[in-house]
Image (cartoon, rainbow, N blue to C red):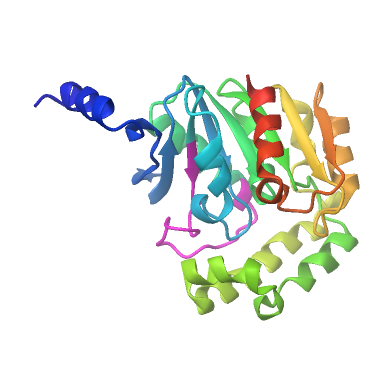
Amino acid sequence: MPRNLLYSHLSSHLPHFRTSVTSAKVAVNGVQLHYQQTGEGGHAVLLLPGMLGSGETDFGPQLKNLNKKLFTVVAWDPRGYGHSRPPDRDFPADFFERDAKDAVDLLKALKFKKVSLLGWSDGGITALIAAAKYPSYIHKMVIWGANAYVTDEDSMIYEGIRDVSKWSERTRKPLEALYGYDYFARTCEKWVDGIRQFKRLPDGNICRHLLPQVQCPTLIVHGEKDPLVPRFHADFIHEHVKGSRLHLMPEGKHNLHLRFANEFNRLAEGFLQ
């Protein structure tokens, strides 16, 4: 049976056929990058996970519930994270720029003409860099839990999460299941050293110099009870990304898109349309 006929045959017999989540790997910049994809909408949206994150651990409610008629949703695992291994994750000085290029090149390899970005935490930093460096490719952007620079206060917060044995079981378990304890623990330590290296740069700079170059409509969401990213980071990004909007969630913590998934999804969908 020709492929297009098979597809319509399956679609007519399986109501959820096109709403299921598929996963695959693509060779990008010398690495096999893993991604998940769902939906059939004309608006492509990339989900960018946080530190040690992956599509499956970081974006369950988004892959399941973002509008599949409006959006084609792609969640990627950055190199060294999730199922984009090998290689092991490393943190050279330009690791955020490398992730931004990998992400954009992945979507181009998947033949998307233009995309919107939903970036959480480190994924929010990656999204900011991608939007600044590839402005013609990025349509809109939603970020939360991101920071454009590192302060002494941040440095102390990072030290506090270096030892994964002290994490809550609920946060630890999915990552331990994904990586095995040793890789998880080792990579977390490497991440703390990797993110703290920015503290040695002028103004603790990660991407503050790029913020004025962001041209796409941008929504910054901040959980007012986020223990990992203080409010001043959201304010700084809002101030320096022209035309951006800041939305505060009074009860939100760092994982506000998981804890308040319905509210977050509604907010993101409304902004992206």
Instruction: Give x and y (percent) for residue 11.
Output: 28, 27
Task: Specify whether 262 is left or right of 81.
Answer: right
Whether residue 1 is visible: yes
Q: Could you tell me which residue is drawn at 60 percent across and 58 percent down? A: 92
Q: Which residues are magenta?
A: 74-96
Residue 95 is inside the magenta segment: yes
In the image, residue 76 above or below residue 158 = above
Q: Could you tell me which residue is drawn at 47 percent across and 23 percent down? A: 69
- Residue 168: quarter of image: bottom right
Observer-nearest of 105 and 113 = 113
Q: Could you tell me which residue is drawn at 75 percent across and 53 percent down? A: 254
Task: Specify whether 117 is left or right of 147.
Answer: left
Q: Quadrant of the N terminus?
A: top left
Residue 210 is inside the magenta segment: no
Instruction: Give x and y (percent) for residue 32.
Output: 37, 51
Does the magenta stretch mainly form a helix, a strand or a loop? Answer: loop
